[in-house]
Amino acid sequence: MRVIRGLHNLKAAHRGCVATIGNFDGVHRGHQAILQQCREHAARWSVPLTVVVFEPQPREFFAVDQAPPRLTRLREKVRLLRDFGAEQVLVLPFNDTLRSLTGREFIDQVLIDGLGVKHLVVGDDFRFGCDRRGDFALLAEVGREQGFGVEHTRTFTVDDERVSSTRVRTLLASGNFSAAARLLGRPYSLHGRVVRDQQLGRTLGVPTANLPLLPQPLTLRGVFAVVAELEDGKRHQGVANVGFRPTVGSERPTLEVHLFDFSGDLYGQRMTVYPCTRLRGEVKFDGLDALKAQIERDQARARHYFSAAVANHDYSLPLASAPLGRETASSDSSSAGNSADANDG
């Protein structure tokens, strides 16, 4: 798969495609349905499927503190888009230059001159352009003039509710990881590379793998029972803290993971962490002795959770496949609200 960073890197070989545009945060099952919709057209035209995303996401550009937490970093998003059929991802830097384009300029520079689109799939309330004229109607009008097709995304529902990134975030924030997995089509996970840190956990007898997180709003915060997958594919149960470690103080968010009954050097390794259940929120303790006592209680609760979950075949564990629930896909964008959030994120 080709990742193209910025319009200036588009080459003649990238032109001629079926395209879709959006945040695609989480690449959930609604997004996956859009990609399937695009793949059908790409196969008909015998052209690549191109996904256009923005970095940062528009709401992060305009109001970082009020932007919703990300479900996926760009690296993970690109990998998932590839897994679900995208052959090209055009990453547009969302900056003053891009935001100053009118709706027609965006269409001309990105879709026509840049990508040479054969067919475009977008939500029918997709808005773009500094003149606020960029919408589905303008895309359809220009498409008729220039000879490319435009259609709206299909609405995709699970258990009679539309799948959206917002719905996934709400479920994760409430600790309902099993329901979130049904919407994502996979267990939710956090990813990163283990780095050297203060090594405080080692002095407390609880060595941790530390994975720095981006300085953005956190989807999760607190202490969780987790399953961690290492580069060798082996999975280990453990407990993790996501946040700012208030007892010791930290300016950047960190994912700290303690693996049960594990010994070895993890520095430099990439790790995938699957939260399974929320144990508690972050708390500032009166000293390290109080923190150590609470860590021991957290470990005991996590071990008990895993023992009970395995015995009861609990589908919140990433070791099992969660039931996907009732699902429907509809071409009627007026049903179940509006479909744009399915690819806007």
Image (cartoon, rainbow, N blue to C red):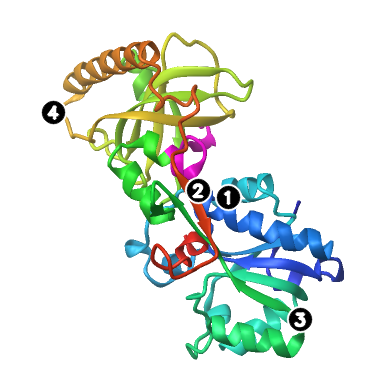
Discs 2, 1 touching: Cβ within 8 Å: yes
The label nearer to you, 3 versus 4, is 3
Circles 3 and 2 in contact, beta carbons < 8 Å: no
Residue 169, placed above or below residue 289: below
The label shown at residue 72 is 2
Local SS, label 1: helix
Tell me what residue is drawn at x 65 percent, y 59 percent: 37
- Residue 196 in view in this figure: no
The answer to whether the residue labelled 4 contacts the one labelled 2, judged by CB atoms less than 8 Å apart, is no
Residues at badges 1 and 3 in contact (C-beta under 8 Å)? no
Percent position (x, y) of residue 62? 41, 72
Q: Amino acid at mark 2?
A: Thr
- What range is drawn magenta here? 181-196
Q: Residues within 10 Å of mark 3 (few under 14, many from 20)?
A: some
Q: Where residue 77 is drawn, which disc sits there?
A: 1
* Residue 46 versus residue 239 in the image, above or below: below
* Residue 287 relative to residue 15: left or right: left
SS assignment at label 2: loop
Which residue lies at the image location 32% right of the left edge and 64% below the top edge?
66
Q: Label 3, on which residue?
A: 113
Position of residue 13 measured from the top left corner of the image (x, y, whole percent): 86, 66
How far separated are the C-alphas under marks 3 and 2? 30 Å
Mark 1 neighbour density, 10 Å: few (under 14) some (14–19) many (20 or more): some
Mark 4, residue position: 286
- In the picture as drawn, the residue positioned furthest to the left comes out as 286
Q: Nearer the viewer, mark 1 or mark 4?
A: 1
What's the amino acid at mark 4?
Asp
